[in-house]
Amino acid sequence: MTGAVAANAPVKTMPGPNNRPAKISFRGITKEFVSQAGGPAMKAIDHLSLDIAEKDFVCLIGPSGCGKSTLLNLIAGFEKATSGEVLLDGTGISGPGPDRGVVFQEGALFPWLNVLENVCYGPRRLKVPRERYLAQARDILEQVGLSAFAHHLPSELSGGMRQRVAIARALINRPPVLLMDEPFAALDPQTRVLMQEMLLQIWEHDNRTVLFITHDVEEALFLGTRVVVMSSRPGRVIEDVRADLPRPRDFSVLKEPEFVKIKADLFALVREQTLAAAADLAGSTHLSRTK
């Protein structure tokens, strides 16, 4: 495990096996949100720098409110930084695009469309020939284990199945980057394990670049090639760990001494930042009451 990083020090991707170039770059990012009630702006991220190598699977963890989802929204093109640069392949992000597939905690499927129609929605909007996107959709549904449910509505599916549809919908455009914001958080433990295994199989087959947000330290270490820990708000990178554990990876790795040790270290670090966030919140509440 690497040592803690100074608060505003730039943190860059540790070299991969072939010194792969950066796919995603955050350069000196600060993000502030203006209060709608006229109060002071809230700084969510403070001068954060981070590079994510091509084909890396990077998991972001940290306390609630530390800016994890904000970072994902910046690279997705849903938000703009207050200052600094967000780059994809060295080019600034100007908005959402089909080169970045996004999966949220809730699948956000169209309830009036069946599974196949939900998956085909993106390429149909992009005017991809029907024969091509239908063939791609069927291949992806087979990949996520939903071929038999192509004509079912979302309301007829379990939570895990709906998330499989959301992943399939993100994959059909063949994006080089997959952005996932706590996609398995609402699932029961058994389904969550199956989804983690499925996602690893897809990534090990395609090797696209993945940025994955989670609160679960074990999930982050099991899935990721790297685990990046963020501080309490305003978010900064305080630890960047390369998860050099065997691949292809299955759940037997959870019992390995190295996995257990790194997990304990990461958990302690996240707990420390969570306590700091709670203390900051308590202090802010006390000040507001005494004014």
Image: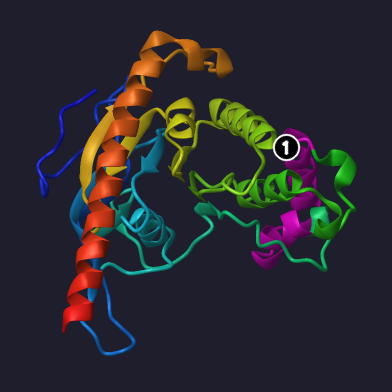
SS for callout 1? loop
The stretch in magenta equals: 118-145
| Overall secondary structure of the magenta section | helix
Which residue is pictured at 18% across the width and 40% down the height?
11
- Residue 85 rendering spot, x and y as whole percentages: 23, 60
Q: Residue furthest top?
A: 257
The amino acid beneath tag 1 is Val
Q: Quadrant of the C terminus?
A: bottom left
Residue highlighted by disc 1: 144
Nearest to the observer: residue 197 or residue 66: 66
Was residue 213 drawn as part of the magenta stretch in this picture?
Answer: no
Residue 179 in the figure: left or right of residue 3: right
Q: Is residue 111 visible?
A: yes
Q: Residue furthest bottom?
A: 38
Quadrant in the rendering for residue 74:
bottom left
- Residue 218 rendering spot, x and y as whole percentages: 46, 30
